Image: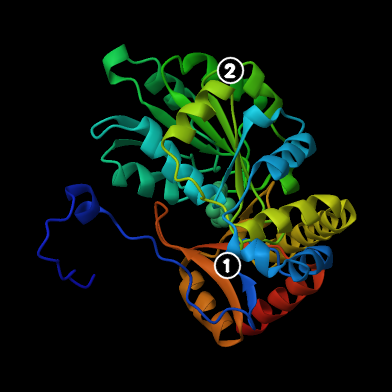
Amino acid sequence: MKKMKLPKIPVRRAVLALAPYNAPEEGRARKLRLDFNENTVGCSPAVLRALSRMTAQQMAIYPEYQATTKRLARFFGVRPEEIHLTNGIDDALHLIADTFINSGDRVLIAEPTFDMYRFFSELAGARITTLRYDDEMKFPVADVLDELRRSSSAKPRVLFIANPNNPTGTLVQPKDLRRILRAASQTLVLVDEAYFDFSGFTILPWIRQYSNLLVARTFSKAAGLAALRLGCLFAKPEILSAMRRACSPYPVNTAALVAAEASIRDARFLRNYKREVLQSRALLEKGLKRLGARIYPSEANFVLADFGPRAHRLVLALERKGILVRERKDFPRAGFMRISAGTRDDTRRLLRAIKEIL
Ligand SMILES: Cc1ncc(COP(=O)(O)O)c(C=O)c1O
């Protein structure tokens, strides 16, 4: 890695120690984007119409949240005090760290998972306890329970769970989530449901039962609004009001609010896109197996495939054909690729390309 040139003003130790997050290369718009689990067709046309009706006055006024928060709360089946809007889930993670993690606190993460849990925890100066998904890509329930039951001074402050998990695509079962939430007597548990639209499984109603549960959702995936950055956090009002104390006054912009409202009004678009992705995912799993990869059955809009020693060359050759997939080199060994499921046509194009290359 290139050595960082340091400014004269001392930089926080936690920042110097951070492994930087590798954002995707730019110029992806004209390629087949199967690398970041985005919606590949774009958002609902109703969203574009709503954005085009925005006025110069709206642009000049700082965002106002109450009306949209109420409508989104109704859409998600919660009360307005039980939802907090963020600038994507990324921003929600930052806010969780700012509100709950002191330097030196312990944070529990099962890897491989979404990199930003580690990133924001390390930025806050947390000590990370890393557990591993097993060889079948199952969540390490027993190890997590052991960690949560340690003596009170060693208990983790926060536990992050992506459900379904990125990049494994696997879900933690409801009975295990209940055991974890009961054992997490002094630990905040974030259940990140970024891929809920594809799994159809949620524990959102449980926020009324567990005072240590935070659930996150995003408009970046199925709704196709990744560019506008809108996430939602759900929890008991006392958790969210503590977080609002640590939050900047205008984390979400007005265009994102307008887009989210138009998006939830167009239920048909979302239903159709989800149906298309589920069919495409089935095609992708079948096709990858036929091409000799080991795959892990997924509940999300992507599939993790083990191509072994062929993976790296394959990723580069696909890129030359204008098809982007994500290589994951950080597993127990190299050879894994995470491939998003877009439309069935996207999947057919990808499978044809892999066949040609191999
Ligand atoms: C599990 C998970 N959570 C959150 C995100 C990011 O969501 P957002 O775009 O709302 O910041 C991703 C993106 O890949 C993800 O995989």
- Disc 1 is placed on an element classified as loop
Query: Disc 2 marks which amino acid?
Result: Tyr
| Disc 2 packing (10 Å; few <14; some 14–19; many ≥20) | some
Can the viewer see residue 75 in this picture? yes
Image location (x, y in percent) of residue 273: 82, 59
Residue for badge 1: 35
Residue 358 visible in the current orientation: no
Residue marked by disc 2 = 210
Q: How is the image coloured?
A: rainbow
Residue pushed farthest left?
8
| Residue displayed at 82% across by 55% down | 270
Left or right: residue 165 compared with residue 243 = right
Which of these two is toward me, 64 or 246? 64
User: Is 334 left, or right, of 283 in this rendering?
Assistant: left
Q: Are marks 2 and 1 in contact (CB under 8 Å)?
A: no
Residue type at mark 1: give it: Asp
**From mark 2 to mark 1, how far is it between C-alphas?**
35 Å
Report the side of 332 relative to 165 (left or right): left
| Badge 2 or badge 1: first in the primary sequence | 1
Give the farthest residue toward the bottom: 320
Q: Which x, y percent locates residue 292?
A: 63, 65
